[in-house]
Image: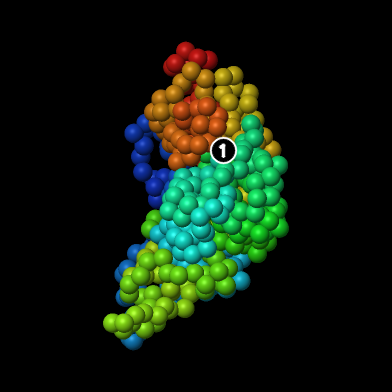
């Protein structure tokens, strides 16, 4: 279906499903698949799958090194993907985009390279209680290895960042604040413009984990005012195995390499080595060449819909789902109530039923959700929960999926006698 037809505020997600071959696959329930686990990883549209196949089939050679036409073609396409990522997140230059495997690697790159150079014993690093482990464990490791202190900004009962606590901790002038844009465990959208301003006023750099925001809403690094941003391709309809780190150029230029070897050097002698310019300084070894083509196609697909339209669509579906869940006794949704502060990630508990059982029953109804701690165990501990069930929505979802979610909850409560 031509995505141009969908340039409206709220579009029919089901019409897009024709673009995603996975929805042709029969589900063992005999029902159409209601896929509500895009926050973990998103299905791929045909254009992305074809772009990867086309890259391997017709444009494949190693990049940056070959002095022959096919390699020049592969290099031009690889660098074209880098430009597309830069444009998509409002980066001032494509030289500030480093291709990595995923958001986890992007954050580790900053923690190892910037962190080990700039953080020392006694320095303070701030993260938050809301983070995915990918934006928490690397900072714990940095603190352990350097003797730095690590503190976590608190979260409120309704799942917001506690800005008073942030201000109080910033008064200690930390070196860095590592914060998520959208929580994968609560759905909270953090007020990053304000958070960045506060952090910069206190002299701290801001590392933004944008794994759950870049796929779902317009993101502009300049407007947000952050210093580093991490994203994963596979959550934004692109292939797995590719992600990106954006960093301010002067920061990237001052940082030592993360990994070393081929591709990232300028000159190697037996006595020593000089580094390539950024971003290649951080891209040791052969990169994910065909995956970059797939990521470029994913960006084209999302831009074809328009990120404002993607956000409006998800916001509408979230509001419908939130209101439907609120009307169900024994169901509690985590995170802020307002759709302004809540992405289309619904993390909830059903009284008396473990989330793993919930997900199993849902699967029998053709509804795919995530159950567990969502790689955010401190969030579960904060709310004294072992786990939650999480339904996350994307472009191919529609009101029918919301209704399927509600029916699956009712069926679960009936089965467990908790209705
Ligand atoms: N940050 C957030 C908020 C996430 O939800 C995830 C994945 O679920 C990640 C980071 C890590 O992404 P990846 O596994 O692609 O590195």
Is disc 1 surrounded by few (<14), some (14 to 19) or many (20+) residues within 10 Å? many
Q: Can residue 315 be seen from the camera position used here?
A: no
Residue 271 drawn at (x, y percent)? 31, 82
**Residue at (58% x, 68% y) in the render:** 248
Direction bottom: furthest residue: 67
Residue 151 drawn at (x, y percent)? 56, 45
Direction top: furthest residue: 417
Numbered-mark total: 1
Name the element at disc 1. Answer: loop
Q: State left or right for residue 339 relative to residue 28.
A: right
Residue 124 drawn at (x, y percent)? 57, 52
**Residue at (51% x, 55% y) in the render:** 121
**Residue at (36% x, 43% y) in the render:** 25
The foreground one among 252 and 193 is: 252
The part of the image, by quadrant, that contains residue 166 is: top right
Looking at the image, residue 54 lies above or below residue 341: below
The residue at label 1 has a CB less than 8 Å from ligand 1: no
Residue 329 drawn at (x, y percent)? 59, 19
Residue beneath label 1, please? Answer: 186
The foreground one among 243 and 8 is: 243
Looking at the image, residue 328 lies above or below residue 25: above
Which color scheme is applied?
rainbow
Looking at the image, residue 160 lies above or below residue 328: below
The part of the image, by quadrant, that contains residue 295 is: bottom left
Q: Can residue 172 be seen from the camera position used here?
A: yes
């Amino acid at each position: 279906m031509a995505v141009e037809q969908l340039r409206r505020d709220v579009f029919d997600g089901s019409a897009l499903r024709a673009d995603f071959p996975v929805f042709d696959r029969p589900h063992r329930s005999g029902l159409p698949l209601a896929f509500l686990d895009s926050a973990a990883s998103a299905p791929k549209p045909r254009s992305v799958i074809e772009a990867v196949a086309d890259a391997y089939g017709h444009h494949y050679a190693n990049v940056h090194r070959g002095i022959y036409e096919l390699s020049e073609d592969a290099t031009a396409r690889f660098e074209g993907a880098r430009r597309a990522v830069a444009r998509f997140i409002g980066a001032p230059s494509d030289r500030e985009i480093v291709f990595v495997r995923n958001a986890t690697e992007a954050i580790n790159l900053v923690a190892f390279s910037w962190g080990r150079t700039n953080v020392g014993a006694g320095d303070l690093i701030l993260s938050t209680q809301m983070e995915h482990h990918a934006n928490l464990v690397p900072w714990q490791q940095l603190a352990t290895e350097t003797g730095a202190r690590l503190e976590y900004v608190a979260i409120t009962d309704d799942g917001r960042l506690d800005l008073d606590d942030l201000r109080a901790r910033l008064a200690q002038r930390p070196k860095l604040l590592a914060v998520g844009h959208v929580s994968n465990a609560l759905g909270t959208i953090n007020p990053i413009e304000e958070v960045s301003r506060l952090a910069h006023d206190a002299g701290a750099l801001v590392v933004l984990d944008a794994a759950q925001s870049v796929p779902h809403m317009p993101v502009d690094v300049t407007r947000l005012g952050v210093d580093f941003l991490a994203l994963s391709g596979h959550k934004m309809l692109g292939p797995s195995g590719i992600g990106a780190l954006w960093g301010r150029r002067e920061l990237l230029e001052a940082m030592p390499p993360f990994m070393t070897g081929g591709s990232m050097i300028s000159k190697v002698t037996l006595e020593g080595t000089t580094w390539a310019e950024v971003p290649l300084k951080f891209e040791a070894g052969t990169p994910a060449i065909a995956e970059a083509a797939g990521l470029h196609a994913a960006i084209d697909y999302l831009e074809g819909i328009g990120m404002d339209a993607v956000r409006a669509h998800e916001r509408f579906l979230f509001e419908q789902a939130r209101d439907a869940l609120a009307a169900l006794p024994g169901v509690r949704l985590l995170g802020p109530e307002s759709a302004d502060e809540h992405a289309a990630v619904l993390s909830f508990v059903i009284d008396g039923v473990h989330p793993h059982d919930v997900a199993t029953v849902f699967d029998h109804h053709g509804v795919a959700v995530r159950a567990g701690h969502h790689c955010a165990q401190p969030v579960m501990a904060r709310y004294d929960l072992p786990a939650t069930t999480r339904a996350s929505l994307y472009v191919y979802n529609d009101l029918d999926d919301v209704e399927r979610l509600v029916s699956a909850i009712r069926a679960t409560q009936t089965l467990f006698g908790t209705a």
